[in-house]
Amino acid sequence: MKIPRIVLFIATVAAIGGLLFGFDTGVISGALPFLQEHWTLTDSQLEWLTTSVLLGAIIGAIASGGVTEILGRKKMIIVNAIIFFGASLGCAFASSITELIIMRMVIGIAIGITSYVVPMYIAEISPKKYRGGLVTLNQLMITIGILASYITDYWLSNDQDLESWRAMFMVGIYPAIALLIGMFFLPESPRWLISKNKLEKGRAILEQIESKDQAQQIIQDVQYDLTVSRNNSGLKELFKPWLRIPLSITVMIFFFQQFSGVNTIIYYSPTIFKMAGIVSNTASIIPAIIIGAANVAACAFSVIMLDRWGRRKLFLIGISGMIPSLAVLGISFHFGEQLGDMLPYYAAGSIIAFIIFIAISLAPLGWLLISEIFPLRTRSLGMSVGSLAHWGFNAIVAFTFLKLVNTLGVAYTFWSYALVCVLGLLWGYFYIPETKGKSLEEIEDHWRQGKSARSL
């Protein structure tokens, strides 16, 4: 059985939101060196500029859970495409650092919403057999967006033109236009339609992606689940004892994902390589492009393997590889003087290894698992909590990275991230569930029975 073409088309178009997520988080890395010289920014101002998009993402995550449940997944993605377009223009034409920070914060609001609405939409429209790969297609598009931002930064960078950063931000309008146009051709989530008593519309969409018998079973399961939780508000239901495990998984998987330090590499990779001895602003972007390409390749591998090997196996393999990669990165900087001109190569090698391991595990699994483990009635709010956790932890790491480097040194900073990964390995052994091949309704029933994560 092949993936229905309509499902692949829907997932691909919706995942342009992931491309925007990746592009607008990654584009800042190549722009920072130029912005620092253009406006003579301090390290503190650089951290605020980097963190502004994350603060916006936190706002988007907090404010949008209920709105997404009211408007629907499709309309929310369309609204976000409009925000991406307007804020990208605002960044390109910013006349001061304050104005740029505000525009980056607006982009962050769209990123915060998109980061969970897109995987939720894809999960709710995907056959269970292919759900892992299709949802992870969004993560693949995120990595492609990051790589595209690095290539754009390099292509548009000019050491003689300190305002090169303006064109870098401007490129973001093109995928925003593509997403906006594409979403008008896609259907609404059938599960959301059924939850809003639009049964026939939901059935018509389900029967295009599932057999008639399977579509009818999904409708019955959704209606039963809604009946069971009808007397509770989504927020009240979210904090009931039977959902404590999925809620804790949602928060903790993003804690370990972010405190591995992954986004210090995404945001600061040219800065890190300048620490390693590369002088030119333009040349410092080249290793970032190589890292971005490795990220895309590893994520493409995870798209294929998640529905074959399963979630737990990839998590344990990935985080087990992240630990030595970060340890070697710290060692490289610790012995930087002895390594001399070889330091950038050792740093690049260990960072590429780290990126490969996280790209097959924590990076895609965070968004995939939280799109699977919540019941329909609380899915928007549960994923909103996950998005809030992701961006909150992300902001803390981004805002403290340069402070840690200046206080502890580069080596001890990366060693501290490695220690977090050791704790993450222990946590994941007990709490990462195996959701491969199970319907969203079967997963909900598992939690209602009070069973553990490992027994799923």
Image: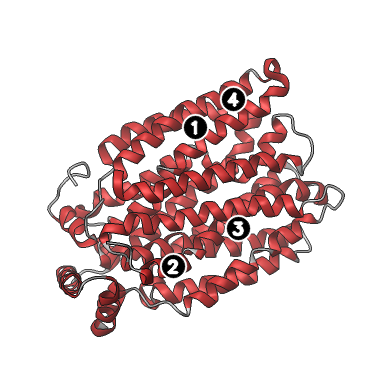
- CB-based contact (under 8 Å), mark 4 and mark 1: no
> For numbered disc 2, what is the local secondary structure?
helix
Q: Given the image, on which type of amino acid does mark 4 rest?
A: Ala
Real-space Cα separation, disc 2 to disc 3, in angstroms: 19 Å
Q: Amino acid at mark 1?
A: Tyr
Q: Position of residue 434 (x, y in %)?
A: 25, 46
Q: Earlier along the polypeptide chain: callout 2 or callout 4?
A: 2
- Residue designated by label 4: 411
Residue under label 1: 417
Image quadrant in which you'd find residue 386: bottom left
Residue under the image location 83 percent in, 52 percent down: 162
Q: Amino acid at mark 2?
A: Ser
Please report whichever mark, 4 or 1, sits nearer to the chain's N-terminal start: 4
Can residue 49 be seen from the camera position used here? no
Task: Point out which mark residue 24 bears.
Answer: 3
In front of the other: 7 or 441: 7
Distance of mark 3 from mark 4, alpha carbons? 28 Å
Q: Position of residue 156 (x, y in %)?
A: 76, 55
Binning the other alpha carbons within 10 Å of mark 3 as few (below 14), some (14 to 19) or many (20 upward) gives many
- Reading the image, the residue beneath label 2 is 64
- The vertical placement of 219 against 279, above or below, is below
